[in-house]
Image (tube, rainbow, N blue to C red):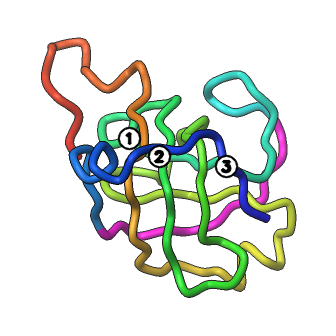
Amino acid sequence: MTVVFAAVPTEAADRLGSRQMHATAYCQSGTTASGSSTRRGIVASDPRVLATGSVIRIVTEASGYSGTYRVEDTGAAVKGHIIDIYTPSCAAAKRFGRRLVQVLVLRRGPGTQLAENRPARW
């Protein structure tokens, strides 16, 4: 399932940047750090790298995981350039494992600047 939030002109997406990141998948249902319920189309990230509310495109060879996602969660093990993709199936999360994916930032979230006015570590 692919969730699309908004079309972004290619030149705007190119300015925001693309990079390889490690990705894992998680299946823990509940409330995210942003206060929403877990559901398909969300990821967890380190807020110093990708702020909550950011919209990203993930490209991977893993079937069913490429698409557009919104950053709505964080996690104790999600530090640095790692994203954690929500899936409702724990078996699917285990099969996904840990892999390299390409991440393209389509829109940065409102928390992109840290409290000390330093840019996020993208």
Badge 3 is on which residue? 4
- Mark 3 residue type: Val
Compared with residue 4, is residue 103 higher up or lower down, i.e. above or below?
A: below
Reading the chain from its start, which is encountered first: label 1 or label 3?
3
Query: Total of numbered circles in the picture?
Result: 3
Residue 32 in the image, given as x and y percentages of width and height: 69, 33
Helix, strand or loop at label 2? It is strand
Query: Does residue 48 appear left or right of residue 63 in this picture?
Result: left
* Residue density around tag 3, few if under 14, some if 14–19, many if 20 or more, within 10 Å: some
Disc ID at residue 50: 1
Query: Does residue 118 appear left or right of residue 24 in this picture?
Result: left
Badge 2 is on which residue? 45
Residue in the image at 83% along x and 78% along y: 91
Give the extent of the magenta segment: 20-30
Whole-angstrom CA distance, mark 3 to mark 2, is: 19 Å
Helix, strand or loop at label 3? It is loop
